[in-house]
């Protein structure tokens, strides 16, 4: 029995997709499982923790699970301002067996958080992307063959997604005749001069999902300027809706972690992104990192190496 620990209060857009894809994969594999916001009574059941917001449950656990697995959807790195070393205590927990990251570049950064000599496995597993879940959200939205001269910058409006760089690039896109939308899935932090940016002609702010997907269905491109990221799911969804996904790159094994998009632009030379849009560059995506079956197989192989799972 696999016990999947879930956060019922999570407000992120991608988390329901993750859980839906994970359930489908476990059903297909015939694995006995339970999804719950509470820890199991039996400490021998392997526990998959799906969000960092649930870590503190382990501190309060009685009994403590003997086999803990963590799904990390992001990785702490020195290019962000959100690193809290105290939150990494669980990486040193004696019951921790493995940490799953979404893509290979994140693995070295995860290993940096472990204690010297740690036997914890750090594995690139991908993301069990449920296209049926997204298609239900996109119901009634049809991608247009006639693309509007429109560029969308997706991502939360915080330093992780460099809104000031988005705005700087927006001015250059507008000079080329593009409509520009900086679309945040959450309300922008108050210290950003959103009203000023709007006065200067940039459409910026929080958008409901339906409106956001409608934008992507008409846009020429979606451009990410993240300094962290992982699979940059917003760009994957952009391609699903017909917009060119323009992803940044850094040096090898340094964020941003977006190696499944090819080609990418150099984040230190962002005008390359503008040229990619202008030239309508064809971008391919390595879709194995969005595979439900591949994700669940990696998950199950890792757990069964250390623990016996019962299947139907």
Image: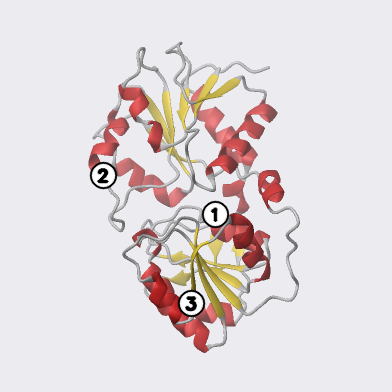
User: Of tags 3 and 1, which is closer to the observer?
Assistant: 3
Up the image or down, 238 lies above or below 94; here it is below
Location of the C terminus (image quadrant)? top right
**In front of the other: 141 or 255:** 141
In the picture, the disc for residue 202 is 3
Mark 1 surroundings: few (<14), some (14-19) or many (≥20) residues within 10 A: some
User: Of tags 2 and 3, which is closer to the observer?
Assistant: 3
**In front of the other: 4 or 155:** 155
In the picture, the disc for residue 233 is 1
Q: CA distance from mark 2 to mark 3?
A: 34 Å
Residue at coordinates 38% horizontally, 61% vertically from top-left?
A: 227
Dot 3 and dot 1 residues touching (CB under 8 Å): no
Work out whether mark 3 precedes mark 1 in sequence or the reverse, and give the earlier one: 3
Q: CA distance from mark 3 to mark 1?
A: 23 Å
Q: Position of residue 158 (x, y in %)?
A: 37, 60
Work out whether mark 2 precedes mark 3 in sequence or the reverse, and give the earlier one: 2
In the picture, the disc for residue 186 is none
Element at badge 2?
loop
Q: Position of residue 190 (x, y in %)?
A: 34, 62
Residue at coordinates 30% horizontally, 51% vertically from top-left?
A: 82
Asked if one can make out residue 285 in the rendered structure from this viewpoint, the answer is no
In the picture, the disc for residue 84 is 2
Q: Name the quadrant containing residue 53.
A: top left
Work out whether mark 2 precedes mark 1 in sequence or the reverse, and give the earlier one: 2
Up the image or down, 197 lies above or below 190; here it is below
Mark 3 surroundings: few (<14), some (14-19) or many (≥20) residues within 10 A: some
Q: Name the quadrant containing residue 58.
A: top left
What colour scheme governs how the chains and residues are painted in the rendered image of this protein? secondary structure
């Amino acid at each position: 029995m696999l016990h999947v620990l879930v956060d019922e209060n999570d407000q992120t857009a991608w988390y329901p997709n993750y859980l839906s894809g994970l359930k489908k994969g476990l059903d297909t594999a015939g694995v006995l499982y339970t999804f719950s916001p509470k820890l199991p009574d039996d400490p021998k059941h392997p526990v998959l923790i799906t969000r960092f917001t649930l870590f503190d449950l382990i501190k309060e656990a009685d009994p403590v699970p003997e086999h803990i697995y963590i799904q990390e959807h992001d990785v702490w790195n020195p290019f962000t301002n959100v690193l809290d070393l105290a939150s990494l205590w669980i990486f040193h927990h004696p019951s921790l067996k493995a940490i799953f990251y979404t893509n290979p570049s994140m693995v070295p950064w995860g290993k940096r958080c472990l204690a010297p000599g740690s036997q914890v496995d750090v594995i690139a597993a991908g993301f069990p992307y449920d296209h049926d879940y997204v298609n239900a959200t996109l119901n009634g939205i049809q991608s247009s063959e006639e693309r509007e001269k429109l560029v969308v910058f997706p991502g939360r409006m915080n330093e992780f997604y460099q809104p000031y760089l988005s705005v700087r690039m927006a001015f250059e896109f507008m000079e080329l005749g593009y409509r520009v939308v900086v679309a945040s899935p959450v309300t922008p932090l108050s210290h950003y001069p959103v009203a000023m940016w709007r006065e200067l002609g940039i459409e910026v702010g929080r958008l409901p999902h339906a409106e956001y997907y409608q934008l992507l269905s008409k846009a020429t491109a979606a451009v990410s300027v993240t300094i962290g990221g992982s699979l940059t799911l917003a760009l994957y969804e952009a391609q699903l809706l017909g917009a060119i996904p323009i992803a940044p790159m850094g040096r090898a094994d340094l964020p941003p972690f977006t190696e499944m998009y090819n080609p990418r632009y150099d984040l230190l030379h962002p005008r390359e992104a503008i040229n990619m849009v202008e030239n309508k560059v064809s971008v391919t995506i390595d879709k194995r990192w969005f595979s439900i079956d591949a994700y669940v197989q990696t998950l199950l192989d890792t757990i069964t190496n250390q623990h016996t799972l019962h299947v139907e």
